[in-house]
Amino acid sequence: MPPFSKNAFWRRSLYHLAWIATLVVVTAACLSGTIMSQVEQPKYTVLESEGNIEIREYAPIIVAEVEVHGERMKALNQGFRLIADYIFGNNLSFQKVAMTAPVTQEAGEKIAMTAPVTQDGVGDSWKVRFVMPSRYTLDTLPKPKNQNVQLMAIAAKKFVAIRFSGFNTEKNINSHRETLLKYIAEHHLSVVGQPTTAFYNPPWTLPFLRRNEIMVELGNP
């Protein structure tokens, strides 16, 4: 039997280390996606459910909205940046302190991140929205500096929604949109407006841990 090779030992050790490193990275990605997704979400009651489709009744909410134009993903990214700029402090409650010694500055008010970020549109025009934390009212929310960012209250409404995982690719979204529209037709539901796509997770979340939804507002029966 040939003597044990030191080279073989080191190759095997490096192989095991590589697997451990991969496991650590994957675990960290899973945990970070899960932890970062634990933010305030709109409150709703499930009235009916069938598989991954639900009919929900949502409580009133306040949203920050921008309208952007262009290809869907570029519009989503642009809208996200505009509203993120607002909630991270670029608003009218930002205060500069008069020059003294030492120089001090008070940061603008920051608004907690919530989920989901929603997007809907027709053609190349898209409305991107962040739901504002429930502790705010229209009177207590800081006023945006950017006139493109609009704050609005939305009354309680009912929606039919389909939930799915994976990346927000056109193929994935279109496939589940078709499933939802088929459900709406088969159940003779009255709907209002265009489908809205909702994204709940940060970009680094693994595909199978992502929560995406397509929602359509329900009208009167």
Image: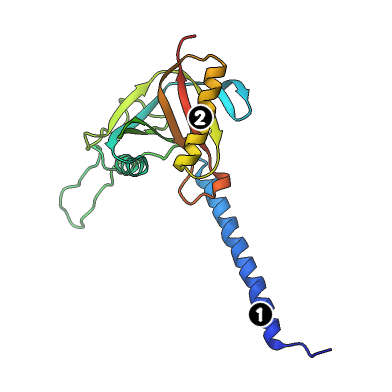
Up-down relation of residue 28 to residue 114 (above or below): below
> Quick one: label 2, few (<14), some, or many (20+) residues within 10 Å?
few
Residue in view at x 61 percent, y 70 percent: 18
In which image quadrant can residue 111 be found? top left
Across and down, in percent, residue 63 comes to: 36, 29
The foreground one among 19 and 99 is: 19
In which image quadrant can residue 84 be found? top left
Q: Amino acid at mark 1?
A: Arg
Which residue sits furthest right?
1
Across and down, in percent, residue 143 comes to: 26, 32
In this image, 190 relative to 132: left or right? right
Q: Label 1 belongs to which residue?
A: 11
The foreground one among 37 and 2 is: 2
Q: Amino acid at mark 2?
A: Glu
**Observer able to see residue 161:** no
Measured Cα–Cα span from mark 1 to mark 2: 50 Å
Q: Label 2 belongs to which residue?
A: 178
Quick one: quadrant of the N terminus?
A: bottom right
Secondary structure found at label 1: helix
Residue in view at x 56 percent, y 56 percent: 28
**Observer able to see residue 103:** yes
